[in-house]
Structures are given as C-alpha cells and as structure tokens.
C-alpha cells in the first residue's frame, strides 16, 4: 500500500467559499492509505509548495493529490514541487475542485463539498496505480521549414537564419513578397511598402542559411516535432533560373498578353514574365496555360532571343526531400472572391474595384504608374466612394469577423486620393471605425480633419450604373437621411479570408482550422503562435486578419519560440503514451489500423503489435479499440479509469 | 421522499470539452452538481467498457464530450467516439436500457456556457426518465 498525501487548496475564497475544506481534509484523512491530509490558503504559493515538500520528506509519501484549480493551471507547478522533494513528478495528480466544482456550484455548498471529496477520492484511485515515469528524450533536427514567402514567412525566415538555423522557405508563387508587394504605401506613416520589402527580400536570397524554393508547395510531411520529413513539390518554371539574368528580352518579344492577377486584372502581363517588375528573385517564369508553345508549338520567340539559353520548355517538376525540426505556416490571405459577393456590382461594373486593386493603381510600378484612373474610360475620378466592411462583420450572409485592416487602409487610400486629386471628393461609408494600433487614431483623425474626407456612418443599399456614373444609394444613420452619390469610382474594402488550400495544408500538418478556415492557435492568450500540433507554428494572416505591424511581431515571436525549441540537444516529451502487454497481445492488428499517427505496427516475428514511442501522441484510440486490454496508456489505464468510475457511483 | 437526483458520469476529452468545462467554471456558469467528470485525452479513447460499467453499476446517465467534427486534436478520435456510441446505443436497447442515458456532445474549449447548459438539460431529462433500473437491483 502506497503512502499518500492530499493537499487541499482554499484558493483564497474561490474554493473555500463554497467547499468546506476543513471537513474535506478531515474526511479524506480517514482513508486508510492517506497518511497526510491538510488544507492551506494558497497551495501554489511558495509556503504552500513548501508544505508539500516537507510532508513528502517527513512522511515518506509515495503519491500526492493536490486538490485545487484545473490541471491546466498548476499541474506543472506541483509536479516540479514534488520533484524537488525527491518524488517522481508523475506520482502527483491534480483533483480539479475549482473550475469543475466550487465555481460552478456556488449556491450548493453541501453538495459541492461532497463532490469535492469524491473528486479527490477518484484522483487517489489514479495515483494508487500511477507509475514512476521519465520524460522521453528525442534527438532533434535543427532545420526549419517556412511555408509562405510573404512578409510573415520572410520575417520568420530571416530571424531564424540570423539565429543560425538552416531555413527552407517555400513560396507558392514565383517571387517573394506576398500581398505586401502589391501595396503602395503603408499606414500610419505613409512609407512606401516596396523598398522595405525589397531590403528583406534581397537579404533572404543572399543569406547562406536560407534555401528559397519558389513555385513550390509542401507535398508531404511525416514525423513529429523535432523530426519531420518533408517533400517539397517544386513546379516547373520552364526557365533555368541558374542561367536567367532577368534581362527581360523574352518579355519584350512574347506575343501573348493576358490580365495580370498580381495587378488585380487592371493591367496586362505576358506569357513569360516576372511576377512584378522588380521582383525578388528577379527571374521570369513561363505560364504554360497562356504560352503558345504549350498550346500548339507555334512560338519559341523567348527561347530564340534569350542570350543565356535559359528557356527550357521541357523542364519537369521536381520533388525535393528535406528534414526539419519545426514548421511555420505563414500562408497569408486572399480577399473575399468576386464570384461569391452578389452585391455592390462587384465583378460587373468595371469602376467598382476592391482595396487591393486600388493599391495597385496607387503603386508607382502598377498598371497606371501610380495614377488614379477609372478602369472603364481612363478618366480621373472626381467623386469616389469607399465602402467598408464588405463581407466582414456580416454574420448572416458573409463573414462575422472584423478584417481589422480595412478601416486604416481605407483612410490611407482616401488621403492618398485627396492628395492626388485635390478637387475630388472622397466619401467613406463605415459601420464603426477601429483604429487601435499605435498612431492609428491620430492618423485617422488627421485624415478626416485635414483632408476633407467625408465619413458617412451607414450602409450602402445599392450600387448601379447610370449615365456613365456609379450610383451609390446609402443612408447616413447619424442624420437619418438617405444619400445618393454619383460616383466615378467605388472601392470596396472586402473581407480577408484565408488563402486557398490552407485547409488541405493544415490537414497534412495535423494543424486545425476554425470554421472560417483560419489556423487555430494552441491557446488564444498563452500560446498564440503555436498550433495545436507540437512543432507546427503560425505567423501572419493565415491565423487571423492582421496588419503588417502585427504580422511582423507575430512572425518574430514564432521565430523566437522555434529558436527556444531547437536550442536544446534533446527534446523531452511527455511519456504518457501507449504500451503493450506482450503476454496478452494477440496480434490482431486493430490498433495498427486505428492509429492516426502510424505509431502502431505489427511485429510479425513475435506475433504482437508494438508502439513506436517517438510517434505515439497518447490519444488512446488503440486502448479503446483493443479487444483484450493488451495495450494501455501510461498512467491512464483502463483499470485506473474503471476505478474512478467506481468511486463516482 | 427526497427528489430523485440523477448521477451522471462524464468522459471528457482533454482538448475540447474538459477545457470547456473549465471555462464554465472560469466564467462562473452554474449547473447542478450531479455530474462527475473523468478526464481522458480524447473522446476516441472512451472504451465501451467504461460506459457499460457505469450504467450497469447504476449511473443514471453517461456524457461523452468531444471536439466538434473536423476539430479533433487527434484527427479522427471524435468520429471513433461517434461510431462507438451508435453501437452502444444499439446494445443498450437490447439490454432494455433507454438509449437516451448516453449523451454524446461536441463541446469546444470556448463553449463553457454550452457545457453548463448541456449538464443542466441532461439532469432535467434524466429526472423525467427516472432512476437507472439497475440501482433498484443493487439496492435490493
């Protein structure tokens, strides 16, 4: 029989205000193998922990139950405390009598006291059969995979590389920059976006620790934290990038022109082209769906003109194998698609565009060379309407969340419009203005006061074409009046949504997404950059809408977390995983099929199933499906659970 | 005679419903004290034996709480629980138990109120249903 100790915390009045802790301590103390049962005002405090340590040594305790808050709060605290007193930490368990007892039964003191006692008794059943365990030590690979070459992925990559870690940066498109490369200026300082981005991009391509894979996607991933094996699918660009020098002669001779999605269909690009003129790496790519060679072999002009003989029409996709210890998902965002937005004439009226399209218009390297011109006739718009919260904060029809950046970029765009067209009139339809960042409110107020931007609080009911104008019907809810504006150009601040394919990627990585497809963090407050799977980290808009400031902060936080993870020699993992009683296992193989991690395998020579310690995550699926109780989870065995059921009935 | 107070045994998964039950506490949701919670890593780890034993020993209801479909921390554990519960309900019918003594519910870590409401509702339903017939047998 083990000598057990029970420590009951008052948590001030949080527990003791409802549960009669003295009575609980007294009653529990009467149990035969409980050698020590006391209560104390704050067990987690230093004197409280000291009480536990002293009792362990004085009474030679062989198991401890601390009845207090949820194990998610202080399990670690108390396990560390017992360890310093020489006890194996896995012999300490928490009885959750605060979150799941005193706080939820505040009016039923007697019943809560009884329940607290039962919870402690059940936890004692567990401790009686707990084994002494040691954390599992795993070797660790110090390379990192970063998925996404936008500002989030670029920042994380650079931080990690500067910390001395090898980084594989995988970007879906042919160049770095992501959506930030499409922007004109950034709020609130109105500094041009591109030069800032360019500096980082150039550092990445010249950094000896960063290997950049453009036109690439993660195809397959196996393994676990510290030891992932990945396959990168590198798609053919039909250009030998080791030869291409970015001279652009191929672009000049290419006869095929089509709308550029980088320029949001406001400009044209060639079938062989850069992603954008000053892209990094400055390399061209052939788009086979547009190129005449791939249609009917009728044109090879780029190949003929290339001084470096870089065009390779027969280039094949590659599969590249790498090993990494951690993975960053920095997949970014898309804007709410035209096809799904059935209002405001978006997609039908050429002079109704989205915020990113307007950014391209404002960019000096954009389709209009920075000039604000109506897409329909190239005239300068004299009246402009900006509509905020398009498909955001609209739970009935579109997205319930706030896209966070629209208030600020709309103010910036209205300001830039007013500077370029001083006699023009911008109107902004808004629901609320959110300007919570550093310097944002000041920027916004200045825009409204000094630039003559007219803010109208209300929704737009209709947008339609009439006499060469875009008619906007709305309402100003502050005056209660209906408003009609004959606009020349309308800009919609459409909702941010996760970029395409994130759900599939998350499934590959065993990360989870919320109902809108944003990646979920392990804990919204305490672990905001970790995914729910160990070793998989998050950065940028793939997790939730955020501006560049927040994205860069999060990416650096992610890089910091990973550096901490990879700075140790060995990775220690909780040993609460499955094991097999070899004398009982009949080798039926059900566990092998049911395991989601390929952690169970048949040993045909011995006719039993085995557990791969490094792969097992301790979910318990095999335990529940084993027909003869041959496999169990360490310190959460069927007997322990059944005994707990016993105490409760 | 005092009013019948049902006894519920709950098997809650670590990542969603157990954490949701913690949140119910943090936000001071109040629910009847008829429930006893057993923490497991995943709803897919709830062995049929646990449920059957609880009911045969006289528990009036068993609540299994897991992550919403698609949200399982271990990918598919909640689907395993769903299949297992379907079979268990079949068995219960054969044994002459009301299948409504087993509740499988998806309650996420952020749904503290849903957890409290679920327990409250379950207690009400079980009161209507009356005690587990096995109790009379054991008490005889």
Image (cartoon, coloured by chain):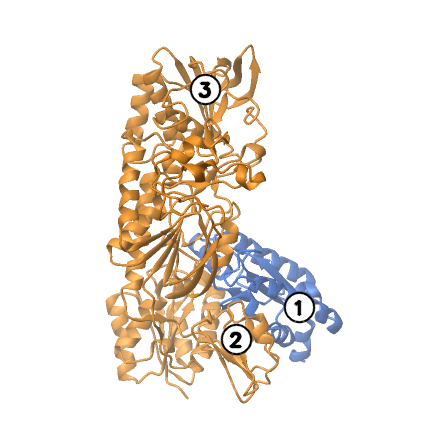
Q: Residue at x 49, y 40 (%)?
A: A287
Chain A: colour as depicted = orange
| A510 vs A339: above or below | below
Alpha carbon distance from label 3 to label 1: 67 Å
Looking at the rendered structure, the secondary structure element under dot 2 is strand
- Give the x, y percent position of residue A77: 31, 67
> Would you say the residues marked 2 and 3 are in contact, meaning their CB atoms lie under 8 Å apart?
no
Looking at the rendered structure, the secondary structure element under dot 3 is strand
Residue at numbered disc 2? A600
Q: Residue at x 28, y 56 (%)?
A: A209
| A445 vs A38: above or below | above
To which quarter of the image does residue A45 belong? bottom left
| A535 vs A33: above or below | above
Residue at numbered disc 3? A385
**Which class describes the residues within 10 Å of circle 1: few (<14), some (14-19), or many (20+)?**
some
Chain that is blue in the image: B
Q: Residue at x 28, y 80 (%)?
A: A86
Residue A478 in view: yes
Residue at numbered disc 1? B131
- Is circle 2 on the same chain as circle 3? yes
To which quarter of the image does residue A189 belong? top left
**Which class describes the residues within 10 Å of circle 3: few (<14), some (14-19), or many (20+)?**
many
**Nearer to me, A308 or A533:** A308
Looking at the rendered structure, the secondary structure element under dot 1 is loop
Q: Which of the two marks, 2 or 3, is nearer to us in this view?
A: 2
Tag count: 3
Chain-order first, disc 2 or disc 3: 3
């Amino acid at each position: 029989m083990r000598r057990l100790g029970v420590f009951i915390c008052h948590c001030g009045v949080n527990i003791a205000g409802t549960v009669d802790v003295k009575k609980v301590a007294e009653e529990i103390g009467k149990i035969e193998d409980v050698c020590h049962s006391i209560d104390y005002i704050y067990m987690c405090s230093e004197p409280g922990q000291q009480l536990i340590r002293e009792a362990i040594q004085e009474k030679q305790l062989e198991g401890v139950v601390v009845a207090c808050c949820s194990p998610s709060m202080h399990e670690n605290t108390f396990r560390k405390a017992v360890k310093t007193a020489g006890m194996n930490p896995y012999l300490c368990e928490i009885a959750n009598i605060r979150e799941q007892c005193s706080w939820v039964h505040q009016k039923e003191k007697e019943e809560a006291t009884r329940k607290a006692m039962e919870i402690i008794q059940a936890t004692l059943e567990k401790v009686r059969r707990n084994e002494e365990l040691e954390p599992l030590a795993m070797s660790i690979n110090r390379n990192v995979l970063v998925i996404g070459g936008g500002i989030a992925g670029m920042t994380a990559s650079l931080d990690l590389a500067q910390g001395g870690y090898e980084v594989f940066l995988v970007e879906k498109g042919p160049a770095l920059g992501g959506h930030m490369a499409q922007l004109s200026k950034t709020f609130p300082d109105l500094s041009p976006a591109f030069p800032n981005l360019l500096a980082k991009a150039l550092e990445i391509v010249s950094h000896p620790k960063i290997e950049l894979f453009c036109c690439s996607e993660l195809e397959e991933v196996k393994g676990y934290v510290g030891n992932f094996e990945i396959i990168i699918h590198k798609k053919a660009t039909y250009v030998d990038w080791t030869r291409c020098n970015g001279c652009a002669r191929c672009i000049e001779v290419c006869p095929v022109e089509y709308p550029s999605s980088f320029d949001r269909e406001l400009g044209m690009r060639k079938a062989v082209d850069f992603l954008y003129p000053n892209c990094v790496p400055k390399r061209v790519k052939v788009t086979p769906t547009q190129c005449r060679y791939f249609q009917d072999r009728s044109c090879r002009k780029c190949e003929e003109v290339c001084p470096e003989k870089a065009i390779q029409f027969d280039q094949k996709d590659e599969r590249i194998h790498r090993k990494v210890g951690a993975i960053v998902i920095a997949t970014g965002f898309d804007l709410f698609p035209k096809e799904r937005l059935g209002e405001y004439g978006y997609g039908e009226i050429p002079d109704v565009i989205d915020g990113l399209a307007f950014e391209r218009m404002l960019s000096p390297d954009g389709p209009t060379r920075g000039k604000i011109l109506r897409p329909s006739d190239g005239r300068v718009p004299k009246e402009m309407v900006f509509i905020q919260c398009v498909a955001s904060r609209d739970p009935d029809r579109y997205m319930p969340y706030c896209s966070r950046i629209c208030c600020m970029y709309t103010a910036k765009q209205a300001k830039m419009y007013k500077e370029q067209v001083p006699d023009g009139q911008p109107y902004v339809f808004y629901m609320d203005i959110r300007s919570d960042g550093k310097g944002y409110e000041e920027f916004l107020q200045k825009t409204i006061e000094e630039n003559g931007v007219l803010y109208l609080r209300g929704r737009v009911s209709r947008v339609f074409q009439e006499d060469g104008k875009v008619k906007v019907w709305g309402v100003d809810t502050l005056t209660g009046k209906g408003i009609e504006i004959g606009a020349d150009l309308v800009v919609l601040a459409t909702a941010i949504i996760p970029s395409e394919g994130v759900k599939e990627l998350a499934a590959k990585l065993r990360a989870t997404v919320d109902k809108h497809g944003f990646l979920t963090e392990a804990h919204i407050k305490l672990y905001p950059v970790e995914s729910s799977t160990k070793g998989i980290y998050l950065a940028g808009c793939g997790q939730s809408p955020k501006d560049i400031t927040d994205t860069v902060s999060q990416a650096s936080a992610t890089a910091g977390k990973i550096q901490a993870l990879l700075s140790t020699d060995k990775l220690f993992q909780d040993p609460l995983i499955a094991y097999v009683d070899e004398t009982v296992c009949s080798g039926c193989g059900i566990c092998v099929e049911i395991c989601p991690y390929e952690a169970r395998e048949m040993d045909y020579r011995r006719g039993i199933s085995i557990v791969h310690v490094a792969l097992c995550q301790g979910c318990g699926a095999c335990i529940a499906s084993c027909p003869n109780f041959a496999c169990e989870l360490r310190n959460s065995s069927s007997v322990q659970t059944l005994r707990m059921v016993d105490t409760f009935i | 005679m005092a009013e019948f107070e049902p006894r519920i045994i709950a098997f809650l998964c670590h990542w969603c419903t157990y954490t949701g039950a913690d949140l119910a506490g943090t936000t001071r949701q109040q629910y009847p004290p008829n429930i006893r919670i057993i923490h497991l890593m995943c709803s897919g780890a709830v062995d049929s034996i646990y449920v059957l034993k609880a009911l045969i020993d006289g528990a009036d209801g068993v609540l299994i709480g897991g992550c919403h479909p698609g949200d399982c921390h271990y990918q598919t554990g909640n689907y395993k629980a769903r299949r297992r519960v379907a079979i268990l309900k079949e068995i219960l019918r054969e044994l002459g138990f009301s299948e409504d003594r087993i509740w499988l519910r998806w309650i996420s870590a952020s749904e503290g109120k849903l957890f409290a409401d679920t327990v409250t509702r379950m207690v009400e339903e079980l009161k209507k249903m009356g005690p587990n017939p096995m109790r009379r047998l054991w008490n005889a």
